[in-house]
Amino acid sequence: MSSPAERYAEARLRAAQASQFPALDEFARDLGFDLDDFQREACQSLERGSGVLVCAPTGAGKTVVGEFAVHLALRGRPDDPAADDATTPPTRRKCFYTTPIKALSNQKYHDLVARYGAEQVGLLTGDNAINGDAPVVVMTTEVLRNMLYAGSSTLQGLAYVVMDEVHYLADRFRGGVWEEVIIHLPASVTLVSLSATVSNAEEFADWLVTVRGETAVVVSEHRPVPLWQHMLVGKRMFDLFHDADAARKHDVHPELLRYTRETARRLELGEGRSAGPGAGRRGPRWRGPLRPDIVDRLDREGLLPAILFIFSRAGCAAAVQQCLAAGLRLTSPEERTEIRRVVESRVTAIPGEDLTVLGYWEWLDGLERGLAAHHAGMLPVFKEIVEELFVRGLVKAVFATETLALGINMPARCVVLERLVKYNGEAHVDLTPGEYTQLTGRAGRRGIDVEGHAVVVWSPETDPRHVAGLASTRTYPLRSSFRPSYNMAVNLVGTVGAEPARALLESSFAQFQADRSVVGLARQVQRNTETIEAYGAEAACHHGDFDEYFALRVAIADREKAIARQGQTQRKAAAVASLERLRVGDVIRVPSGRRAGLAVVLDPATGGFGEPRPLVLTQDRWAGRVSPGDFTTPAEVLARIRVPKHFNHRSPAARRDLAAEVSGTGLDRHGGRRGGRSRQVTGEDHRLTQLRTEVRHHPCHACPEREDHARWAERRRRLERDTEELRERVSGRTGSLARTFDRIVAMLTDRGYLARDGAVTDAGRMLGRIWTEADLLVAECLRRGVWNGLSPAELAAAVSVVVFEARRDVDERASLPRGPVADAVDETLKLWGEIEADEAARGLAATREPDLGFAWPVYRWARGEVLAKVLGSGHEIDGEMPAGDFVRWARQVVDLLGQLADSGGASPELRSTARQAIAAINRGVLAYHTSA
């Protein structure tokens, strides 16, 4: 307990701060809790007129600083004469509060409305426009970027911009938008940047100072709710660390290490294998705790509500079903009644037949028991309901993918990680320390929980020491993903001119980081140069010029490799030619790889671009495309069988019957040569013979220390090669963005979007209002009239190919509605080919190839067909398209259609058709999403 003198000193300090920072004192009185030191420091910097960068863990309360910027804007200018006049209201300034996602914008809008009233707060997202002229407007970052380029009058009076989750600028798809906004905001605007904990906050702040002026950096590693780390091994729960001191040293709890090692040893000896079918199988088998058992244990130990991260949509849905099958019930009768009331009030706009297709009744059953899944494949309204019920404590356990960690405020008492590996869209990769921190940061609700808990489920491939490293490492560097785009180029040139635009790009965080990295690379080049000289001295030979002798040896090695490559090229050419000759029904042998064995050709895939990739069915019932890389020898037709005319290779029964016919040919599965390569018979190479003769007659060849000299010469050669690469990297990074910008400007000039004198043409102004990844392709389609004359449903299908991107690669091309849609898509693909060739010639990143996988679903939906049929027509590997994916892509199609409807470069007929297509799409589950 403090003494009277200490309490008096604290009171004096508070009074001094109140007089020095009156706005903060006024703001803090209404909060209902004391500000943390980092919050107070950041707010004081803001009141002094400085910009601020706040880096703190999830749940630490960063948004309080953003809300103080709102308070300052509404309070008015401190130097305004009206501020001293009680009868005259002070001049109010504006504050824009930007967020990366619409859900977060909606949540922040409701929070600010609750505090300041609906007349003071507006919302601008792609879907909603509410009170956009209010003094405080919440918006997605893209909306503010578009305002800046358009010179919107809404920017008048803007004093503060809050960029929540500013670490999103590392996002490789959208991150560049954050930098565009930071660079283009007027100098009079004070920037408040709120970020997760990053390890290079000082570097980011140094850049902010260069582009925004004075910026205070406030970094806090402190979690307001302590986080305890655990591991669940079978049925036993262990602390990951013995105490806080051990956590700082990464020292894993000795008992946990001993138990996991003993468990792993028993598994190796086979003791951990369970009886029953497959019990005699070789190798250890580990069955971790069942998901219902984990939830039940968390419930018994008072650790609910919990988020259980499972990095798979199917896994999340399966987890809920497993808990239901196990009879878990986590709610009281009163809670079940309230859950049903909330759900029924939110789904009234969705037709009953659609609810059945969406699995509504099974989903509701889970909710009423306190269980739910949360992932991007769910209908948005279903996700919103889960979020609302979880925050209210009605849903107790949510099985979620990692997307939840990047979304809205949804803290829990406990977080469980089932695995430490996730699929990133291309491969299964380990979680990074930053991702681990972000996921476990959800644990511990401020003002509710005394402590939060993170639990990692152990498996034989999980090393507790690796988990300790993830839990203790704070290495999460912010890396810029900024790069110039076509849309950005015309907007920059139109706003400030070509040369100033180059200067603006060179002030980006991307170029700032590149220039800083050059310093370290240049030092390495200098060190390498000194080492090369030392290696050269060691390689010197008193018999003669060893550099000359070593060059002959290198020439021999290079010539031998070239001859070997020539043989490989000939073999590949033979394989390509043999695949191009295949016909439907040909039985061939795949000589190597996972699909080795007999196969029948279903689709020869002739007449396309690139290498032939015939669709085959193997005798093991696998259907897919093979490539020349699967053939070490030319494909030989061994037999022919009849393939049914409308054979469906997606049907298991059809695959089984045809595979039986392949096996029935009686051909040997592997043949005589089990994947062996044909021997390359070549005569002696004259140049190679000549080089070998020169080597034998060189004076250094007789040196007894020849091989020692050669080793030093080889080291020097490798280091010279590495050093040359470093020099190229230095050259490539210096002014790299400006060079890319110059290439883009040259391409846009040649295509008529910019005039030779640098002015923006009418086509360029049209391109400047197209906000999509394939902006130039859309502009070209408009200029060439590719989408003219289509019906609303046909237009929706045709434009979908430039926005849709499948989650995973599918071998065969998706089908299209016949007639005008197919013609328009073919023209689009042709234009894409022209653009890609132009980009390749100029050394620019390629525009993504159009994806046809969403054409049928959006076409059928726009024609008014039922949801079940629409979802079933998706070009998905795993069957029908998830409802959440359908809604998300349909919204993106609607967004692009909206741009077409407002585009000056589109014909009046096309603009009208785009508006009709929007109306046709916005029904049922889409109509709810529009109004939500």
Image (cartoon, rainbow, N blue to C red):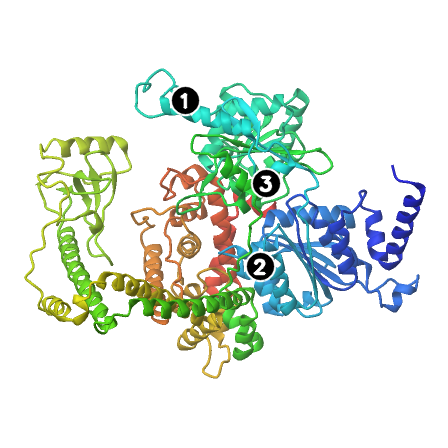
* Image quadrant in which the N terminus is located: top right
Specify the label residue 372 is tagged with: none
Mark 3 vs 2: CB contact within 8 A: no
- What residue does disc 2 label? 142
Confirm whether residue 907 shows in the render.
Answer: no
How far apart in space, not on screen, are marks 3 and 2 (Cα)?
Answer: 43 Å
What residue do we see at 42% from left, 54% from top? 800
Q: Secondary structure at mark 1?
A: helix
Q: Secondary structure at mark 3?
A: helix
Where is residue 147? Give x, y as percent. Answer: 61, 65
- What residue does disc 1 label? 266
| Displayed quadrant of residue 231 | top right
What residue do we see at 72% from left, 34% from top? 448
Q: Earlier in the sequence, mark 3 or mark 2?
A: 2
- What residue does disc 3 label? 249
Where is residue 843? Give x, y as percent. Answer: 37, 69
Confirm whether residue 46 shows in the render.
Answer: yes
Neighbour tally class for label 2: few under 14, some 14-19, many 20 plus, Cα within 10 Å = many
Q: Secondary structure at mark 2?
A: helix
The amino acid beneath tag 2 is Glu
Mark 1 vs 2: CB contact within 8 A: no
Neighbour tally class for label 1: few under 14, some 14-19, many 20 plus, Cα within 10 Å = some
The amino acid beneath tag 3 is Lys
Query: Farthest residue toward the top?
Result: 275
Up/down of 931 relative to 651, above or below? below
Where is residue 661? Give x, y as percent. Answer: 14, 32
The amino acid beneath tag 1 is Arg
Up/down of 498 relative to 860, above or below? below
* Image quadrant in which the C terminus is located: top right
